[in-house]
Amino acid sequence: MSAILARDLETDNRQTAPAASRALRIAVAAGSYVSRRDGVSVYAENLLASLLDEADNRGVGLTLDVYVCAPAAETLEAMLARPGPSRRTRARFHVISVPDDSARGRFIDIPRRIRAGGPYDCVLLPNLQPVWLRGERSLAVLHDLTYRVARAHFPRWRFRYMDLLTRWHLRADSAIACISRTSEEDLLRFYPAAARRERLHLPNGLPVKLAATPRIGWDDAERKLAADHLNLLFVGRLNRLKGFDRVRRVCGLLDEHLAHAGGRATVHVVGKDTSETAGLLADMPLHRVQLIRHGYLDDAELNVLYRRSAYCLFLSRNEGFGLPLMEAIWQRCVPLLSDIDIFREVMGSQYPLFAGDDNSLRDLVGFIEQMREDCAYRRGILARMDSALGRWRDGYGEAAASLLDWVLVRAGERARSVGGAA
């Protein structure tokens, strides 16, 4: 038997927009949600919480049935139950768990439960998943096409699987959503048939977990950027796809620079090992730069590192959005970014980006030195970071509004169709 964790959120009365003619029902296939809350999990929980708030603010009756594997059910329920800007009156959610945390549970049991619990006005998949929903009005969220953009870093079987999965969703779903304009452009470039499908923009944003934590001020940020001992941070899988080979080279170049300029640096590394990790960490004769490995860190521990660190290294070959980038900006930890389209979209055209060649990485080290020495330049970069934060801060709210609009239109079409048939 599957356990059902239900919470109906009752709230104070408030003025709202006119209610929809009938309550909406949305199912969420959240089999990929995990209790350690990776990027897809954080995206899903924030989008769903914002969707509940958006429905309540509009006076739209909404029931959200969120199907998840049992080990993560309590975590997801707690995240959705966290109070938003107001207590909800018309929106409620049920977290419905399946006991099997294997591929069978995620891709067979959850779709079966959704079909049994329907019909729904929409079935939302927070990421591409190999599930069969048999005619339900489904909407899948595409995070990135890294397997296409950086194909050399994927084994053949993985590339073929992801390619087939993308093609499946383009044929099977009512619409497809992208978390960034860059991902949408990649989709149209590699899959021209997507131009004939309805597409939504459901962007990432500032997670609630960050907005609830204190942010350091400019004075504190300037002190850590001008310090004699710099702290830098890397967050991500330790492989070439995430640019750890470039991080390794930056460590060497920074070590050479500090040997002449004076000072020291510590690079904190937070991320999962991969088959490439041992080779990337081997033979790093550093004298002025210390590299410290950290195991799994919870939100509070990671936030402390962001607050302490002057820089965060994001030198990956591709990203769908780069959620840790928002975490870094929130704590005024200056992002050191690879020259890829998504970082230009997030940070704006004037923010410095660095390619992976030696000359560009030397420029990156020069950027660090200029930030230390030039107060006006330093403040200009901090201002650009604040500007980027302002653009993306309410990304989840914008995504929730677009998603609710889409569901309301489809629900209206279905009601007219049923009425006409009668």
Image (cartoon, rainbow, N blue to C red):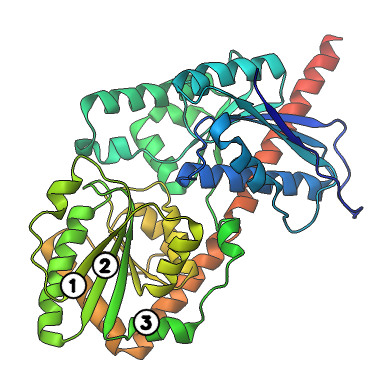
The mark closer to the camera, 3 or 1, is 1
In the rendered image, the quadrant that contains the N terminus is top right
- Residue drawn at x 42%, y 68% is 306
Q: Nearer the viewer, residue 412 or 390?
A: 390
Q: Quadrant of residue 355?
A: bottom left
Give the SS element for disc 1. strand
Q: Position of residue 163 (x, y in %)?
A: 34, 26
Q: Which mark is residue 211?
A: none
Q: Residue furthest top?
A: 422
Instruction: Identify whether 298 is placed above or below 1.
Output: below
Q: Quadrant of residue 373?
A: bottom left
- Kind of residue indicated by mark 1: Val
Q: Are marks 3 and 2 in contact (CB under 8 Å)?
A: no
Give the SS element for disc 3. helix
Q: Are marks 2 and 1 in contact (CB under 8 Å)?
A: yes
Instruction: Identify whether 60 is placed above or below 382.
Output: above
Q: Nearer the viewer, residue 236 or 43?
A: 236
Question: Quick one: label 2 or label 1, which is nearer the N terminus?
Answer: 2
Q: Which mark is residue 267?
A: 2
In the rendered image, the quadrant that contains the C terminus is top right
Question: Quick one: label 3 or label 1, which is nearer the N terminus?
Answer: 3
Q: Which residue is mark 1?
A: 289
- Residue drawn at x 83%, y 37% is 61
Q: Which residue is mark 3?
A: 224
- How many C-alpha atoms fall within 10 Å of the one at disc 3: few (<14), some, or many (≥20)? many
Q: Is residue 112 visible?
A: yes
- Kind of residue indicated by mark 2: Val
